[in-house]
Amino acid sequence: MPSPPPRSPHEAPKSGRRESWIRCLADTHRDHPDRQVVAGHHNVNYVVPLGWRLAVLLNTMPFRARVKCRMPRETVEVVPRIWPSETDLLAVVSRHLKEVPRCFRDFGDWSLHSYRAGRALSDLRPQGPVGERLMGLFADFFARTAAVPDAELPPRPDGWPRSENSQGFLHWLIRFTEEEVHQANLWRFDDLFAALGIPSDAMARFRGAADRPSLTPRPFCLLHTDVHRANVIVDRKDVAVIDWELAMYGDPLHELATHLVRMDYPQDEQAAMESLWSEAMRAAGLGRMTEGMATDLQVYLDFEYAQSVFPDVMRAALDLTGLADGPEAADYAGAAARVGRALRRAAGPLKLEEAADEDRAEQALRDWYAGPFGRALADAAECRAREDADGADDADEWGRVPEPTDTETTSTGPDDAAAQQLAPFADLLTGASRGCVLFDFDGPVCRLFPDGSSRQVADALRDLLRARGVQGVLTPEEERSIDPHDVLRAMDRAFSGSDLVGDLETLLTSGEVAATYTAPPTPGAHRLIRELRSRGVRIAVVTNNSPRAVAAYLHLHGLTDAFGPHVYGRTAKPGLLKPHPDSLNRALLALGAEPGDALMIGDKEADLLAARDAKVSFVGYAGDPAEAVSLRVAGAELVLSTLRPLLAVAESGPPGAAGAGPEGVPDPH
């Protein structure tokens, strides 16, 4: 997918005594005891009175004015953001649409905005008809937004579809939904989607529908893309549309479609809104933007119904985990009603043949909530957030909290020797060459099962075998093993492809996910990952663990974006576990890397053997001397007892490619 452009020069942090005063006063406003809290999906806003000192410094009027302190929220990203800064866009939009609140200052972690007085339409008319006058104002808003000069807008991402490439724009939206919304969240919601009757290839089916007409080329323009009742402020006879963080540049019919779906107009008002929009665009001299509307609007409506099923399901599920005392029957029923409505609207566009009714949806939500990806993971994330907050006092000037330190001596002698051995990989680790680094998970990234705790999972697998009446298949060594993979491999040899093997894998995945809640990071691992990521080094996880467990750990530690989709773990074929090179080969293919340009960091003999078969260079990591001996006996030439040498080499080069992403092969679109 195209990446957002870097921040514009004017967005650099302001400095000087005056700006220091502004920041100090702004922080005081943000912490105002009588602040009004207004929360949405993407931001939390504190509305407070504007003091005269800050007003003077901002060159604005203080009398009876209020400001909005805007903090972004961590949320499931389900819509594209092609511009990383709402501030840049508001600087343009507020010049042309005077009613749009402007941004006074962007402090990086939060921003200070003017406040638009009035009431949200969602409070005045939460559902049902809105009347022709308001629809006329909406139509006028869309026409004025479309007329904002393209040349004044912030730069679009590289590879963004050109104006009039409506078909390419639609394909970009479909691909974003498929890759960044549906597939990217399968690690947590796959079971829920399946229980609701949403197939894993739902968006691929939508993209390949043979009965869909090709879109008419239309000129592109600025789109808000999120004009719904909560984002419309009504003040007497005027309206203002707020919250521009999801704005983009594209086909104007997409704007109309998102508005119609999210406003949920009655049928007669939807038809009236379509006519008013078309008339307003033509009256503004933008008639070409309405061409092909008779057929193409329905295509965009179908897309909106199709894509919205994923965020609607995920938000309904996540809202249950946010209830302090846990959901009650009414909460489950309400969530099921939301999910059922989304499924009914998406059933036609996605051709859902077995979409769940509300009773089935409620049971699916209950099962998900009680499973390893529901409340338990949410509680683990909250606990992790509290720990991070407690450690914030130890953060450095960049806000980074120190990771666990190595227990070995701080003498530089061994590190210097190891760094010399790592010299052949210097270009790769510093980002000077187009190489990639492949991390094993349990060991080099974290200690998934410290102190032999994997035995509990291995015992659970053996208990399941006994419950199914399976005896005499495991060897004595496998009966005693604390490694659940030994049990899984043995049963795959005996019953490959059976439901029993699938049930064992599911049970193992649940145990691994639960282990991520408390798994301690390997000292220095997170820092090494972020350093490589910042330098544009392509990185991936290649592991025998479930990719869903890896994704859960990365989610808990804020590392999801570092790896992107590049997590290659256990599949439905246990015979392909390491030492088979399958996970490494999949990573190399997806990253577009040659084996000779790759380095693997592993802690087991199976990692070494897989790297050899894949013809990938190998560096061993051993947390204790016994593991180091095992790797050396197996033939590893370089075994490190700490990740410090790797980090030292990575940090030794010049700064890497700013904003480099985890993507492998460049997006041809």
Image (spheres, helix red, strand yellow):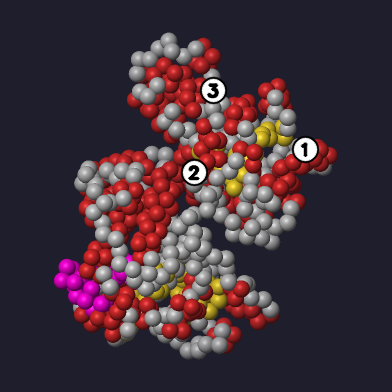
The rendered magenta stretch, by its main secondary structure, is classed as helix
Q: Nearer the viewer, residue 528 or 204?
A: 204
User: Disc 1 designates what residue?
Assistant: 421
Is residue 19 shown left or right of residue 240?
right
Please provide percent x and percent y for residue 95.
46, 84
**First in sequence: mark 3 or mark 2?**
3
Q: Position of residue 13 (x, y in %)?
A: 63, 72
Q: Which residues are magenta?
A: 252-278
Q: Is residue 131 left or right of residue 657?
A: left
Describe the element under mark 2 as helix, strand or loop. Answer: helix
Residue lying at 73% horizontally and 29% vertically, measured from the top left: 637
> Measured from the top left, where is residue 327 in percent x and y?
33, 49
Residue at the image position 37 percent from the left and 58 percent from the top: 171
The residue at which mark 2 appears reads as 551
Q: Quadrant of residue 265?
A: bottom left
Q: How far is mark 1 from mark 3, CA to CA?
A: 34 Å
> Tag 1, which secondary structure?
helix
Which of the two discs, 1 and 3, labels the residue nearer the N terminus? Answer: 1
